[in-house]
Amino acid sequence: MNKKYLYGGVGLFDSPDDIIKAASETSEKGFKKFDVHTPYPVHGMDSAMKLKPSKLAYFSLVFGLTGTFSALALMYWTSSIDYPVIIGGKPFFSFPAYVPIMFELTVLLAAVMTVVTLISIFFKFPNISHPLHDTQYMKAVSSDRYGICIEPDENHTIEEIELFLKSLGAKDITKIYYDDEELKYKNVILQPKFLLFLALIAVIVSGATYFSLNKLMFMQPFNWMREQAKVIPQESSAFFTDGFGMRMPVEGTVARENLPYLFKNQPEEAGKFLINPLEANEENLNLGKKKYDIYCSPCHGYFGEGDSRLRGQFPNPPSIHSEKVRNWSDGRIFHVVTEGQNIMPSYSTQLTNNERWATILYLRVLQRSFNAKESDLR
Amino acid sequence: MSSIDYSRELSVIEGKPALREIDDLIAKPLETKPNIKFFIGLGITLTMLAIGVIAIGLSFYYGTGLWGNNNPVGWGFPIVNFVFWVGIGHAGTLISAILFLLRQKWRNGIARFAEGMTIFAVMTALIFPLIHVGRPWLAGYLMPYPNQHSLWVNFTSPLLWDVFAVSTYFTVSFIFWYVGLIPDFAVLRDRTKTKIKKAIYSVFSLGWRNSNRHWQHYEMVYLVLAGFATPLVLSVHTIVSFDFAVSILPGWHTTIFPPYFVAGAVFSGFAMVQNVLIVIRKVFNYEHIITIDTLEKMNKIIVLTGTLVGYAYAMEFFIAWYSGVQAEQFTFVNRAFGPYAWAYWIMITCNVVFPQLFWSKKIRRSIPVMFVIAVFVNVGMWFERFVITVTSLSRDFLPSSWAYYTPTLTDFGILIGSFGFFFTFVLLFSKTLPVVSIAEVKAVVDGSQPSHEGH
């Protein structure tokens, strides 16, 4: 033991009453650095030592609220902004359903962070090389005796402290010295070795997670569910002679609502024989407007004046309000939409037959609105 | 006026042991070599554990088809066992937090052990949802983390609330337990004579110095943790009950579920703690620390919560009738008189009838009788979860899909394994850590607090 570095003087008492009396006298005497050591918390000791009430609970409050609001923020952001999914017809932001998790995270964060704060900031732990450790004094106070420890300050020397302890009636008064190891001691938490250790753990954990989710899942036998004995779309198959996994539909198969067009390259016949099967009611016109606005308006403009929104990247079409188009039958326009005309592409794959007819109904409305008759004004 | 002083506090610890005797007594199991009985006990629990490991291994290899779970009873044993074990875990934090806030000093002798049991019970419980999902190695997906699929978990699902509730409960219980252990590690550190043990205890005690400047904050943290843990205990089984109550199945979709589940959890938890404590106090000679008075108080809580559970059973029937919902009425009649009537009546006898014996003071203080009743309560509470889970699923709205659920040998193997897992931890705990909180017990020994003369 290095006798040079003195920590303080200690004395022991045998009953809780004695230690309370000793503590209050010590604090009244004006010793700045003193502490009481007891095997369990003794009631009334805080006021005897004149300690201010612990402020730790305020930290807990802050941590708890942080937990509440970060839970809310996470749930709000993920389910209303980042990836909104309708679940059970509930609104994206369904607050009542968030309450349980908000509560749990409040408790989790508050509890964990309070204890971390207690240990690392209030106690400055872990610290296993304090001068009091491994002394007879510590062994006594952790078991059945009550001790007081006073450190010398500018007004009190160690001799005065020993005399004072004696006057209190303390037993086993001794001086406590630092030993070499304790002198060199630095808080573990900030040591590079410890930080490196933490970093290493972080790397290992994230590496393991990456491995298990991105590699392990694709290895035998963990890929059971992924690799099943069935043919999935676009896969090849040795079973069929053509090597395709998927089968071709039987010849003559027609997709629903897509009957083949009878008037290929026969615009005039189409104009003559095709009749619009739809009635010009509100439902059909709404459908027509929707489809027109989506599929036709980029080139023809919302009102069909040929004012394209494509800024010259595609030649502007002629107006649909021309004499020619106005006099065309619905069937003739249907032919243009179905087959395309010169550079205008075909819409037969984007629009079903009915949708095309509905669009034409709406196109008629546009034409009529530009060339209204006297009778329309009434 | 009268000679009885009602303000006098009754002593919690019998006799007036010297503080050092308490150290000696509590540290004894850690300082002596385990005897043959301990190894026999450990052998039994490890065998049970091995049965469970084999059963789970087979399930992983052949798939969950080895279990009785099938349409329409998809929940079967794994969920029954999960709810059962989470319920067992409720006594610990209740004792350490709620009874702490209520200043029930008798809790000091049993809090540590009950907390330990909480932790082990929750660990046991967690096995079940993990294996029930079929691919436990994908459990990471339960956490909301930014992933390749850019998908998030469903925060409106009670099953996800459960993930958060149970993992929070485990973490907080664990912290609570560890914080309580710090001063005791310091005691052990200062007592032990071997170097290795000393190093271990030093590390775990973090350098605790019994300083009052520390005790001050320490007590505050204990209070804060108790304050947070109290609503937490109540929330955990509430959320577990949401797993059922938020669905629309008759017999599950009821508002009484949260309080009913919490009462049931405390009920079964106390019964399990009671069982284990009776053995521990006998084996380690803790009769005057875990006193008969303490056990009697536990019995009072058992009869209270048992009555609450009985009330809930009755109320479920009443509401089924009163609601006028046919499906609901059918479910309850089916529970009591249908194919699972045997399970239902086991549940009623064990949970409602037997605990009522505790109204008699003589029975409350008779150790063999209370041990048997506590075992019955555990059996009954297991059957309660079985009845709730299985009867509702096996016969729901569509009679064409009704089916009888029969658990398989593998199911029982896993159940036995869960008991092996739990009791292995309990046994190891009793030999490696102080099973009674040294500092807390010292603080409630008569004469350990100042008399405040002249204050």
Image (cartoon, coloured by chain):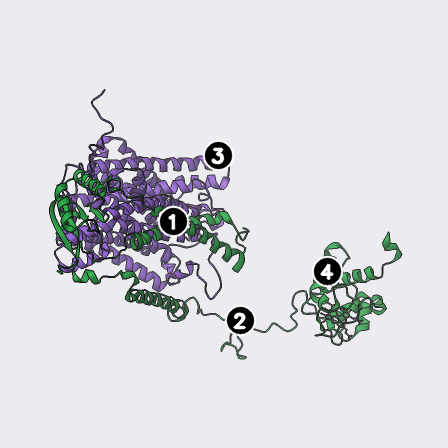
Chain colours: A green, B purple
Q: Earlier in the sequence, mark 1 or mark 4?
A: 1
The residue that label 1 is drawn on is A107
Q: Distance between the residues labelled 1 and 2?
A: 48 Å
Q: Where is residue A113 in the image (x, y as percent from the top left)?
A: 35, 53
The amino acid on which the numbered mark 3 sits, given as a three-letter code, is Tyr
- Is label 1 in a helix, a strand or a loop? helix
The amino acid on which the numbered mark 4 sits, given as a three-letter code, is Lys
**Which of the two residues, B183 or A160, is positioned nearer the viewer here?**
A160
Residue A233, labelled with which disc?
2
Q: How far apart are marks 3 and 2 (CA)?
A: 54 Å
Which mark is nearer the camera, 4 or 3?
4
Q: Distance between the residues labelled 4 and 3?
A: 54 Å
- Is label 2 in a helix, a strand or a loop? loop
Same-chain check, marks 1 and 4: yes
- Is label 3 in a helix, a strand or a loop? helix
Task: Tell me the crowding category of disc 4: few under 14, some 14 to 19, or many 20 or more residues within 10 angstroms, Cα based.
Answer: many
**Which of the two residues, A177 or A329, is positioned nearer the viewer here?**
A177
Q: Which chain carries label 2?
A: A
